[in-house]
Amino acid sequence: NPMYEVYWKEQIKFCKHGYVTDKGEFVNGRLYFYLNFCKIDSADEDGNPSWNTPFYTIPAQEFSDLYYEVKENSQDIIIFKSRDVGFSTMWKGMIAIYDYLFTPLSTTGLGFPKGEKGEGYMKTARASISAMITQLPDALKLAAIVDNEGMLYSGYRKVNAQGRWEDAGSRSRIIFRQMVTGGEFRSEDLTNMVFEEIGEFEGNLIKCKNSTDKSMKRGRKKRGVMILGGTTNKTSDKGFKEAKQLWFNPVAHNLVRLSIPKTKMCFDHFNPST
């Protein structure tokens, strides 16, 4: 259907390059994709489980705009937020899934605390990202060469001119790993990196950050952004000490801070009509 192809060509352009509203307001590409095509596990008006597109919120706008700003300046982001403000769905949609779909040959690293609790966070994130990808429109879905608990790898296999099998297509990856030694992503060529629940990285958060930072650079230029996110009530004594060190000394660690308190999710800060 020619109209179908025209529609999706235009939508993919908006996802990649952004969209200007009728009022002249610019919506960056990551936010446009998140608001229009990501569905999140929520509830309907009767409280029943339901997959719905997210509301527009100021924190989502701030986070997505800040991503582009710090990327331009070769900086990273540290975020502390309240529980249940939807930040996990923001980074899953606007970082991990976005680059998986729209940035060929990209690698997004997702790092989680060591131990049983960290393993639980990793499994939850893995299942959530798979479910969100399943909910995407068919026009945006990609075939996967690898789909296991540690990696999603998009593309397909084909026989080349020499008669050998090779990978083809977008070949973008999302890698899930627990941070035990701190160097779990040392051998990767990372596009973006997200550390989840940094308040529970017991004694190795700064080591993880510094080691992973080397995997995001070509010379002095960073390819993408490292995002260190934590929940204010999910901390341990050892883990919170290093997280506080990063938060209160952002310039020394090349970080820009973003705070998402629950008050930012009140009606003055989001638009339920979206």
Image: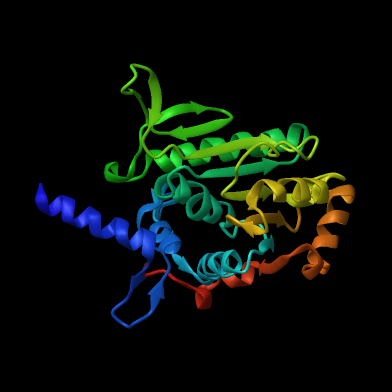
Q: Along the horizontal axis of the image, is 67 left or right of 100?
A: right
Q: Nearer the viewer, residue 72 or 262?
A: 72
Residue farthest along the bottom direction in this orientation? 23
Residue 33, placed above or below residue 274: above
- In the image, residue 65 sits, relative to residue 179, either above or below, namely below
Which residue does the image show at 36% across and 36% down from the upper left?
A: 169
Find residue 267 and report its horizontal and vertical position in percent. 50, 74
The reply to whether residue 22 is in sight is yes
* Residue at image location 55% in from the left, 36% down from the top: 126
Quarter assignment of residue 228: bottom right
User: Looking at the image, which is closer to me, 136 or 251?
Assistant: 251
Can you say whether 12 is above or below 130 in the image? below
Q: Is residue 123 left or right of residue 9?
A: right
Residue at the spot 79% in from the left edge and 46% down from the top edge: 200
Give percent across and percent down for residue 164. 38, 17
Query: Where's residue 151, x and y in %?
Result: 54, 32
